[in-house]
Amino acid sequence: MRFPTEPSLGSDGAELPWVETLWSGTCPADKMPAWAVEIAALIESARGPATADEHTAEPVVVARMQAATDRGADCPVPPGTLHPGTAAATDGGLVRDDVTQFVVRRRRSAQAVYRAAVAKAAVVVGVLALAAATATGGPAALASFVENWIDSFLPGAAPAPSIEAPGQGQEDADRGEGGQPSTRRSQRTAGDGSPSTSGNDPTRDRQASAPGQDTSVSGVPNRQALPPGHGDAVTGQGTPPGPTDPPTSAGSEDPAGGSAGHSSGSPPGHTGTPLGHAGPPGGGPAGGGAGPAGGKGEPPGLAGSSPAQSGGAPEQSGAARGHGGSALGQDGGSPGQSGGAPGQNGPASRPGGAAGPNGGGPLADVPILGVVVRTVTSVPAGG
Amino acid sequence: VSWEGSTDVAIGGLPADVVLAAAVDGEHWALTELFRAYNPALLRYLRAQAPDAADDLSSDVWVAIARRLRHFAGGEMGFRGWLFTVARSRVIEHRRKEARRRTDPVTHERLDGPAHNGTDADPGDLVVERIAAQEAVNALVADLTSSQADAVLLRVVGGFDVADVARIMGRPAGSVRVLCHRALQRLAARCNQGSPEEVLAG
């Protein structure tokens, strides 16, 4: 590239000596052209001494510089801590606030990252739990799990839901283990002796329901039927109490309706067992002595693990007992689960045994994401 | 960060190397001396390039310098070149932001009248001396293109030679020389009320 002949540049493209000194403000006036004198004056003024306003920001900027030097680029300073020299030089809160705000912003960012990580972990755990529920329990167990999981977020709800595969309660019933509380929530609510909630709340029965097992709903005695032999149990006559439960101690201790199934040794707080598990087929040990036996050794709160078990209010206990047996129309649920307090259940009970031949009810309430769907779940041989 | 061309220049009465070494260690006095020595020139450069954000950009430049200061190696000329390199990058970044934002911030001084200047000096004197310095800078670059103004400011305010300006701007040295020459043509034409060619030819 050829440079045109210019007064400020030499033939080789380099600046003339006076031009270099002109830009640096050191060119003598007699060494420069006349037209450059005014330019030289401007350059000299531009390179003049510092003015006062150019130092006004010195305390603030120097303090920020020292704070940045101390912590480096990636080393945050705890809030409120500054270098001693910085604090001495700032003369007030301006610099302190400036640096503190910077640190606080970094801390907020870290908290946001933490919250995001926790939220992601919660989502992953939820998905895994749902997958596990689906794999092990089928749709009904999944629905039950979802319902309990949602309930666990409500105030005063159970801390953790339980997942139980269908048929497990059936096996328990076949073994004669009776009176296991269906869920913690139902146990708590039924055990508080509240007659209004323990016997006729379908939602609590739904939690204990499982495919293949009819969900007993108190107050609807005709939906399920007791197998033969349950009549004695319902009426509370002629059936011995549970082997571990002296009939004398029960009634007064368990006004909510002691469960004969409970007396057979099911641990309080056992969750997830569907309603109607308790009681051996035929309702023998759990049957008639339901009321007296249920209260033995158990606090009132554990007596009624489910509405059907607890029997709830005296006026509902009869129906509840009728369902206690009908819940297991296939295997003969224990009416003793629904046995209420002595003197309440017995007289008030209706002859659930009469419906026994009908076996399990053809309809059941299957909760699916909080919506109860009445479906045909089982048709026992007796029906 | 490494700049060559160290010169024996004093900063605040002390050798530049001593001051820079202390500043690298985070000494408060050294940082103060650096600020006092170079902030006027830096501020004039920034005020000529980005008048509305010069003070903020100056603060950002110094903090950016401080964060990387422990990695610095070089002398006074190297530090000055590094300082203006960072400043030029901040100016370019600021212009890009301004082009996207399309706002024209007005300082409250312009709206509410004179503001506290942070000193006890006479405001009249401050205005006069500021005009004497900053207005001279602005007059130098008033009719220049952006590249020409950049080169002239680095040469006049920053005190760099052609090689250093070329390094800061990322241009060949010959390009910087041409920029400075054409800037000088424009300045001469304005001062002598004639065309640059006429001025330089006559």
Image (spheres, coloured by chain):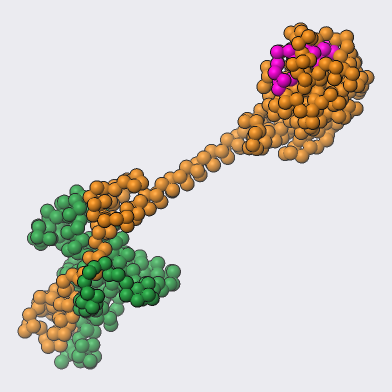
Q: Give the vertical position of B128 relative to B63 (above or below).
A: below
Q: Is residue A305 left or right of residue A81?
A: right
Q: Position of residue A72 (x, y in %)?
A: 28, 48
Closer to the camera in the image, A12 or A298: A298
Whether residue A355 is visible, yes or no, is: yes
Closer to the camera in the image, A376 or A200: A200
Q: Position of residue A272 (x, y in %)?
A: 70, 25
Closer to the camera in the image, A54 or A331: A54
Q: Position of residue A80 (x, y in %)?
A: 34, 47
Q: Quadrant of residue A31?
A: bottom left
Q: Which residues are magenta?
A: A281-303
Q: Quadrant of residue A193?
A: top right
Which quarter of the figure is the C terminus of chain A placed in?
A: top right
Colour assignment, chain A: orange
Residue at image location 66% in from the left, 28% down from the top = A162
Residue at image location 80% in from the left, 13% down from the top = A292
